[in-house]
Image: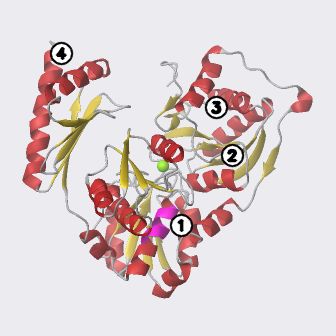
């Protein structure tokens, strides 16, 4: 991460602990973040990774050395820390987490005073300080302080309950299986659900930074246990979170696991029923389903580049109240314009309770699409030219080039072809009303893409 003169990726600073992300570097990063915030008051919190307390201490040293006061929240879900920034009116936060990455990674998210991660422009300011400027430490009598702030998770749970019909959910007495990924979700979600009158069966709920239960990314293939237990105990719902509890993936009462854009579409539908003509913010990687719902319930879709910070920043700029991603991120603006796993869970229960329908029925009522995904290897240095050539070839079709290229066909099928921001690959997402059409599309464009890559390789 340091070779490229760039610290921040699409979701903060990430690296392998004690290789790319060492305590020395963490002190320096803390110092440049401190210089950026200029003697501000910053919340510091972290996820359950084995390296998080160590890195937090190093970052705090850097923050204090440059005159920032630290409000230490300790271990907590990322969205609870983001909520605390707004609620306690601090200048921002530094969150130590690598979200869904494997256990050997850790990372640093920097949050502005609105609870949203910094804009790219602000990140560049920090990067310039890191790579180009001499760090200016403060005098001994002007160092920052450290103060514990208890109650961050209590405030967060109370705030979420304000946005749903708690009495109605309580009356239903739902049984919910929570898969907390052995991380910070276990500190908030089971409590929130019990306070909403649910019976909770928790799995992977002991804090353990080695993630013994399952990998911290809530992909369907990692959630078989959750799905089996929902069926075994006869629960109404299952929910699984990622390592810092901002993403949530849901399982219906039959043990069926859904991708995030399906449950996002459900939240969107009931949001637009009550708030017609609102804007819905979503990356181009989301299913056309999101647009179908917007068309049916008088909403307006705003497509963005892929990345949760872009969704949050766009929501803020357009004063939009709802955003979502296919990976299980739901952004509910009336609470906060960032993805929030516990808030999403409360919204799903609220829809189940107010409609008196099971999750399988609610999701079954949505338009159906079949999805096929592929990866094609492509060297990073070729990515840009490949995209130019591809756009040239499809320019007569109905295309969207916000991020990669998305081709939309009259029969409502679509394919998105975009270079990965982190790996030397192109990703293809095809969707269609039939399985065979989705397969045909993905095969056709995989071939086209390979031909372009080969022609540039020779
Ligand atoms: Mg996350």
The residue mark sitting in front, 1 or 3, is 1
The residue mark sitting in front, 4 or 3, is 4
Mark 2 packing: few (<14 Cα in 10 Å), some, or many (20+)? Answer: many
Q: Is residue 218 left or right of residue 111?
A: left
Depth check: give the residue in front, 353 or 183.
Answer: 353
Q: Where are the magenta residues, as a range?
A: 342-348
Cα–Cα span, label 3 and label 2 = 13 Å
Which residue is identified by label 4?
456
Residue 98 showing in the rendered view:
no
Residue 37 vs 71, above or below: the answer is above
Cα–Cα span, label 4 and label 3 = 40 Å
**Pointer 4 or 3: first along the chain:** 3
Q: Residue placed at 79% from the left, 30% from the top? A: 65
Depth check: give the residue in front, 396 or 440.
Answer: 396
Which residue is identified by label 2?
44
Specify the color scheme. Answer: secondary structure
Cα–Cα span, label 1 and label 2 = 21 Å
Mark 3 packing: few (<14 Cα in 10 Å), some, or many (20+)? Answer: many
Which residue is identified by label 3?
26
């Amino acid at each position: 991460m340091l070779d490229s003169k760039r610290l921040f990726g699409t979701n903060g600073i990430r690296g392998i602990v004690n290789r790319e992300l060492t305590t020395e570097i963490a002190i320096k990063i803390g110092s440049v973040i401190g210089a950026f915030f200029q003697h501000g008051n910053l919340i510091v919190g972290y996820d359950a990774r084995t390296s998080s307390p160590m890195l937090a201490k190093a970052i705090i040293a850097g923050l204090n050395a440059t005159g920032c006061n630290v409000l230490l929240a300790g271990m907590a879900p990322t969205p609870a820390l983001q909520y605390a920034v707004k609620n306690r009116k601090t200048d921002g936060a530094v969150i130590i987490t690598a979200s869904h990455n494997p256990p050997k990674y850790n990372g640093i998210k920097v949050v502005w005073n609105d609870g949203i991660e910094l804009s790219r422009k602000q990140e560049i300011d920090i990067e310039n300080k890191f790579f180009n400027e001499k760090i200016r430490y403060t005098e001994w009598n002007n160092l920052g302080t450290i103060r514990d702030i208890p109650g961050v998770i209590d405030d967060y749970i109370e705030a979420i309950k304000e946005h749903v019909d708690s009495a109605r959910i309580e009356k239903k007495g739902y049984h919910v299986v929570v898969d907390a990924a052995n991380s910070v979700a276990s500190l908030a979600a089971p409590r929130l659900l019990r306070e909403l009158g649910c019976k909770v069966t928790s799995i992977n709920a002991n804090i353990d930074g080695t993630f013994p239960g399952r990998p911290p990314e809530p992909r369907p293939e990692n959630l078989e246990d959750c799905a089996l237990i929902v069926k075994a105990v006869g629960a109404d719902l299952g929910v699984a979170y990622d390592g810092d509890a901002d993403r949530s993936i849901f399982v219906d009462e039959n043990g069926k696991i859904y991708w995030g854009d399906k449950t996002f579409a459900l939240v969107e539908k009931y949001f637009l029923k009550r708030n017609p003509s609102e804007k819905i913010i979503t990356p181009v990687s989301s299913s056309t389903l999101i647009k179908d719902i917007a068309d049916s319930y008088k909403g307006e879709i705003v497509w963005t580049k892929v990345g949760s910070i872009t969704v949050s920043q766009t929501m803020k700029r357009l004063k939009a109240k709802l955003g979502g991603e296919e990976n299980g991120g739901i952004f509910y603006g009336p609470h906060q314009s960032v993805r929030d796993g516990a808030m999403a869970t409360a919204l799903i229960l609220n829809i189940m309770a107010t409609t008196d329908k099971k999750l399988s029925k609610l999701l079954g009522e949505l338009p159906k699409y079949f999805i096929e995904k592929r990866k094609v290897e492509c060297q990073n240095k070729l990515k840009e030219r490949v995209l130019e050539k591809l756009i040239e070839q499809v320019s007569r079709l109905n295309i969207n080039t916000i991020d990669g290229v998305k081709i939309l066909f009259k029969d409502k099928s679509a394919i998105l072809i975009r270079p990965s921001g982190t790996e030397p690959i192109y990703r293809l997402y095809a969707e269609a009303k039939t399985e065979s059409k989705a397969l045909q599309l993905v095969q056709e464009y995989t071939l086209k893409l390979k031909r372009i890559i080969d022609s540039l390789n020779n």
